[in-house]
Image: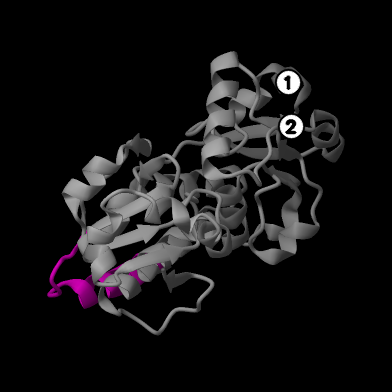
Amino acid sequence: MKIVSLLSAGTEILCALGAGENLVGRSHECDYPPTVKSLPVITRPTFDITMSSRDIDTAVRRRLTSGEALYHVDIELLESLQPDVIITQSHCVVCAAGDHDLARHCRRLRGHIVSLKAGTLAEIQRDVRRIGEAIGKTTEARQYLEADALRRTKVAQFVAEKPRPGVVVLEWLDPLFAMGNWGPEMVELAGGFCLLGNAGKHSAAIAPQPLLEANPDIIIVAPCGFDIHRTRREAHVLQNIPGWNQLRAVQNHRVFFADGNRYFNRSGTSITESIEILAEILHGCGESSTPERWQTA
């Protein structure tokens, strides 16, 4: 069986289920496990992703308003790979290429398209099972989910009697976005109380005032698509917010940068590791994290 994944979360799931050797193509964002980087790249963004957060947001909004595509899909290359299964997504038109980008080419594509649409932790588990069914790995999917549940149970046991700090997870810097989707659920499982962002709903832009009014105990900055180094380049955006230095989290040195691209923003197998990272930050759960996962701001 030949598989193409146009979603980094889908690639992670496929490899976790033992189907990595079946992958013949990937999206430009698929980078884990590292072995997939040698595969042909099917997609690319149609805007400059090295711009500032503000400029990226402006470019994306302009393209969405005008009906322009955010991602280019190399249909000729995709066809030449002759995949039996194509993993894509329909959850967010901004974050990755999706089935909407394939729609006008569906008649030319022979592979079975599996479109993921997870906005909650339960839906991520559902997608693991769906991929398992599509590629003949139902047993592996069940075993993975059982092992994953044990990891989450260990975290839950550790944080059960801990005080629950108020937490804000920021998924974008300029404008500010409070993390929605599975973010609030992860905070809860890690022993915190999510002050902004709605579980199961898309992340949304917020003005600085709600953040100042929430006055969280802990702020975690994990922008979509950014690693920690990229996030640090724009730390001044936060520092320039009027009232930022008066926030409880800032005064108590409880602001943290996390690798949003690798962990927080992907609806795949990294989610449980993200919960473990949150538990480390909030309560010192587990061993000390590597600086590539999270750092003090």
Q: Residue at x 74, y 32 (%)?
A: 73
Quickly name the residue at label 1.
Answer: 105
Sequence-wise, the earlier of marks 2 and 1 is: 2
Per the rendered image, the range of residues in magenta is 148-166
Whether 120 is drawn above or below 77: the answer is: below
Amino acid type at circle 2 is: Val
Identity, as a three-letter code, of the amino acid under mark 1: His
The residue tagged with tag 1: helix, strand or loop?
A: helix
Q: Position of residue 129 (x, y in %)?
A: 47, 48
Using the numbered discs, state the Cα–Cα distance from disc 2 to disc 1 in whole angstroms.
10 Å
Q: Which mark is residue 222?
A: none
Quadrant for residue 42, please give it.
top right
Res 248 seen here: yes
**In this rendering, position of residue 59 left or right of residue 185:** right
Pick whichever, 73 or 237, lies toward us. Answer: 237
Residue 98 placement (x, y as % from top left): 60, 32
Would you say 58 lies left or right of 151 here? right
Give the vertical position of 273 relative to 222 (above or below). Answer: below
Q: Residue at x 24, y 72 (%)?
A: 252
Image quarter in which the C terminus is found: bottom left
Q: Which residue is mark 2?
A: 73
The residue at the point 29 percent across, 55 percent down is 244
Label 1 Cα crowd, 10 Å radius (few <14 / some 14-19 / many 20+): few
Other residues around mark 2 within 10 Å, as few (<14) / some (14–19) / many (≥20) = many
Type of secondary structure dominating the magenta stretch: helix
Residue 92 rendering spot, x and y as whole percentages: 49, 33
Please, what secondary structure does the residue beneath circle 2 have? strand
Tag count: 2
278, 207: nearer the viewer: 207
Circles 2 and 1, Cβ within 8 Å, touching? The answer is yes
Q: Closer to the camera, 16 or 160?
A: 160
* Residue 154 highlighted magenta (yes or no): yes
